[in-house]
């Protein structure tokens, strides 16, 4: 079904001020060749990031044109990250397998019970070529975010055009997964309690967005917001074939099917260079403000690195990708008549592969074509970084 995009107001996050790079590849680590494609979730106590990184050339499986792996890092404030020493999820299996050569471009959702990880994968290059063949988007789950059980090696199969850059969220018991498949954006959904995924649905037709997305619409970053004007929000990018420029935009939906592009798209203002970004990931805060994590090439090292930018001043608590927010506490009004009622947990009953505009980039993903918690550190450190950047 073709879903038309109309221009209207939506709960867009606003312009972004760049706080600079917050995670660079460490020379002595297994992720020394670069870090990118951040996927960030709030688990009620800390930020958890999954990212892609080129594997050491000596570890690439025989016959592969390089290999990518997925790493994991944690942070109390979203800016100071501790990286796990070993990959969280990696390539492998038998030759010819869907992820024999590479896993990259992660997307993550903690649905209150399980961690859900999605990735783009590839196998060996076709005969006479040197670039790995993409195979599609896979899916795995984990109780601890460390040990994974693969649910589908290929949840969304590769169909011959650049694809990837997926994102996931859950609202009112329904899990959504959006991804880019050149030149448009698609989405599927399933009940969070289990069951089959829906058929893919076209939700952003690049031809209906504007000249700034004349090449393709890509890179969705999904959010849920049951208390806002729309149940779902989505940061995404548009690439222009005429100028080769990249822009970021915002869209919202009340049902996951019909999306409205914000009238202020593409985003402008602030100090963030939107056109330099390879990947991006957005989280909102309960009171105000948003944080955008992104990857771009570090001019000093020439390697991919991860940065952060702010829209407004993040206050309150980080919003997870699960709505209603299970980490918020309800006020005890005492109107239930239940002895000892503490009102502790809000049960919700109140309410392509990459960055090259459709062109292959073998240097990126290795494939072708709860308690109540606050984050004062993020606010304090973030503002300090912004002031430092402005003085510079």
Image (spheres, helix red, strand yellow):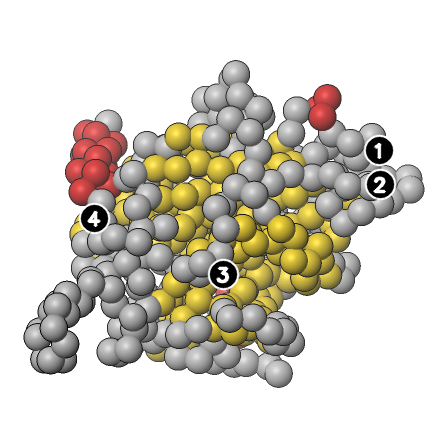
x 45%, y 30%: residue: 83
For the residues labelled 4 and 1, say whether their Cβ atoms are less than 8 Å apart.
Answer: no
- Mark 3 or mark 2: which comes first in sequence? 2
Whether residue 197 sits left or right of residue 98 in the image: it is left
Q: Which residue is denoted by mark 2 in the rendering?
A: 95
**Distance (Cα) linking label 3 and label 2:** 29 Å
> Which quarter shows the N terminus?
bottom right
**Distance (Cα) linking label 4 and label 3:** 23 Å
Single out the mark in the foreground, 4 or 3: 4
- Mark 2 or mark 1: which comes first in sequence? 1
Q: Secondary structure at mark 1?
A: loop
Residue 369, horizontal then vertical, whole percent: 71, 49
Find the residue positioned furthest to the front: 339
- Mark 4 or mark 1: which comes first in sequence? 1
Find the residue positioned furthest to the bottom: 1
In the rendered structure, find residue 374 and report the number of the disc placed on it: 4
Q: Is residue 36 visible?
A: no
In the rendered structure, find residue 63 and report the number of the disc placed on it: 1
10 Å crowding of disc 1: few (<14), some (14-19), many (20+): some
For the residues labelled 2 and 1, say whether their Cβ atoms are less than 8 Å apart.
Answer: yes
Quadrant of residue 8 within the rendered picture: bottom left
Q: Which residue is denoted by mark 3 in the rendering?
A: 168
**Distance (Cα) linking label 1 and label 3:** 32 Å
Residue 228, horizontal then vertical, whole percent: 27, 73
Q: Secondary structure at mark 3?
A: strand
- Mark 4 or mark 3: which comes first in sequence? 3
Q: Secondary structure at mark 2?
A: loop
x 57%, y 33%: residue: 87
Residue 313, horizontal then vertical, whole percent: 19, 50
**Distance (Cα) linking label 4 and label 2:** 47 Å
Depth check: give the residue in front, 135 or 92: 92
- Mark 1 or mark 3: which comes first in sequence? 1
């Amino acid at each position: 079904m073709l879903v038309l995009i109309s221009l209207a107001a939506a709960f867009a996050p606003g312009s972004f001020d760049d706080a600079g790079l917050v995670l660079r590849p460490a020379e002595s680590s297994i992720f020394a060749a670069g870090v990118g494609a951040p996927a960030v979730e709030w688990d009620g106590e800390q930020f958890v990031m999954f990212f892609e990184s080129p594997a050491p050339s000596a570890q690439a499986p025989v016959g592969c044109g390089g290999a990518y792996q997925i790493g994991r890092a944690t942070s109390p404030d979203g800016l100071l990250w501790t990286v796990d020493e070993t990959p969280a999820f990696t390539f492998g299996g038998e030759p010819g397998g869907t992820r024999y050569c590479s896993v990259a471009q992660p997307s993550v959702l903690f649905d209150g019970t399980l961690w859900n990880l999605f990735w783009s994968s590839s196998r060996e290059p076709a005969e006479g070529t040197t670039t790995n063949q993409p195979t599609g988007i896979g899916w795995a789950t984990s109780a601890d975010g460390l040990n994974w059980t693969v649910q589908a090696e290929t949840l969304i199969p590769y169909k011959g055009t650049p694809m990837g850059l997926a994102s996931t969220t859950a609202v009112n018991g329904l899990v959504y997964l959006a991804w880019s498949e050149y030149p448009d954006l698609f989405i599927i959904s399933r009940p969070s309690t289990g069951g089959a995924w829906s058929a893919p649905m076209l939700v952003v037709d690049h031809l209906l967005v504007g000249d700034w997305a004349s090449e393709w619409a890509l890179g969705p970053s999904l959010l849920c917001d049951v208390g806002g004007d729309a149940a779902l929000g989505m940061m995404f990018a548009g690439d222009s074939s005429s100028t080769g420029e990249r822009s970021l935009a915002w869209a919202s939906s009340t049902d996951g099917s019909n999306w409205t592009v914000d009238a202020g798209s593409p985003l402008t203002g602030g100090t963030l260079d939107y056109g330099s970004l390879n990947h991006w990931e957005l989280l909102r805060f309960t009171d105000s403000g948003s944080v955008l994590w992104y990857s771009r090439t570090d001019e000093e090292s020439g390697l991919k690195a991860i940065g952060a930018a702010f829209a407004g001043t993040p206050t309150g608590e980080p919003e997870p990708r699960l709505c209603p927010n299970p980490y918020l506490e309800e006020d005890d009004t005492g109107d239930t008549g239940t002895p000892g009622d503490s009102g502790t947990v809000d049960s919700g009953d109140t309410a392509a592969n990459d960055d090259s505009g459709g062109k292959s980039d073998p240097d990126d993903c290795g494939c072708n074509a709860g308690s109540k918690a606050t984050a004062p550190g993020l606010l304090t450190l973030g503002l300090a970084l912004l002031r430092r950047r402005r003085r510079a």
